[in-house]
Image (spheres, helix red, strand yellow):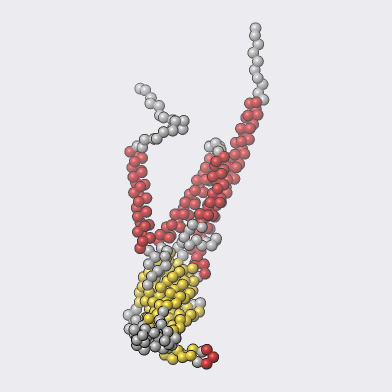
Amino acid sequence: MQNVAMPNYATDPHPRKLSKKGWTFLGITAAIVIAIYTLVVVFYSVEGGSTFSDSDQAPTTGISAILEPISVTPEASVATLRITLASNDKAIEAPDGRAADNIRVTVSGPDGSQEVRIVQGAAFGRAEIEVGISGELAQYPFDTYAGNYFITADFFDRESGGVNQTRETIPVLVTTRGAVNGWDTEFAVEYTAAPDAVVSIGFERAFSTKLFALVLVTLAFVVSLIALIISLLVFSNRRKIEIALLAWSGSLIFALPILRTYLPGAPPIGAAVDIYVFLWSIVMAFVAVFLIVAAWISQKGAELRQEYESSNEPTGQSHGT
């Protein structure tokens, strides 16, 4: 029976035919990639929205305050909201659409109070306010933030010395619109007998943002692990050293910190993602460089000794008879 010699792809590289198992593996891989891509795109299209819930005690008259989140700054524990004021009450809004009296809307939170004032005869409009939020940025990308705020409104009188004295409270109806890109926002409003509106706001990173960050972190870890495995093979003389390996592994030391800046909303250094993954990825890259350098020195020294011994071997001489 004649043995069929298998082609040597190392000395004679040419396209390798795929077996039935190979086509099956490619098909399954393509289906998984398409499914993941579709899932991410669909979630990205529907995320960044907001949900709203309120109680049955919402006032039917008074002033309407529409809250719209503009930005979330976790580093400063601050969220920026746009508040738009309007009213259909004749005692509040004159027929010409302007304020019928001096109106003041106050937003109070754990970090203090902010006021939006509309003097008599001025047009209703909107203003941007910053409210404090609480959360742990170190838990990125699974960090969440929340805050509770009291919203009140009143008619006020200007008195001597610049003091604004409350004359009468105004019921406040709170509604919301819009959202921050990359964040899922949740609003909940409760009304008290004061009458005050208690607004609870929660921010959570969107699913696509979390997945984006996790994919980059996983890629950084896998690439560093590959570099470490290759360096161990070279260091144990299971593979021959190539100088390109040293350049490639050394470039990882500079590429990994740059890759971290691509994380959406990347937190300052010291977050949980650094302690659990990125720190060890950089450590593996450094170890890989050290092992490859040591292997290069060892293998190069062995080659030089072999060349030296070969050049100093005595030359055999033949004598005729």
The residue closer to the viewer here, 228 or 46, is 46
User: Can residue 114 be seen from the camera position used here?
Assistant: yes
The residue closer to the viewer here, 146 or 61, is 61
Residue 175 position (above or below residue 5):
below
Q: Residue at x 40, y 29 (%)?
A: 6
Q: Quadrant of the N terminus?
A: top left
Q: Residue at x 39, y 77 (%)?
A: 66
Q: Quadrant of residue 320?
A: top right
Q: Residue furthest bottom?
A: 160
Q: Residue at x 36, y 57 (%)?
A: 41
Residue 169 position (above or below residue 276):
below
Q: Quadrant of residue 87?
A: bottom left
233 with respect to 214 (left or right) = right
162 with respect to 179 (left or right) = right
Residue 221 point in image, percent of width and height? 49, 51
User: Can residue 276 be seen from the camera position used here?
Assistant: no
Residue 207 point in image, percent of width and height? 40, 61
Q: Residue furthest top?
A: 321
Residue 161 point in image, percent of width and height? 54, 91
* Mark count: 0
Q: Quadrant of the C terminus?
A: top right
Residue 237 point in image, percent of width and height? 55, 37
Q: Residue at x 67, y 25 (%)?
A: 312
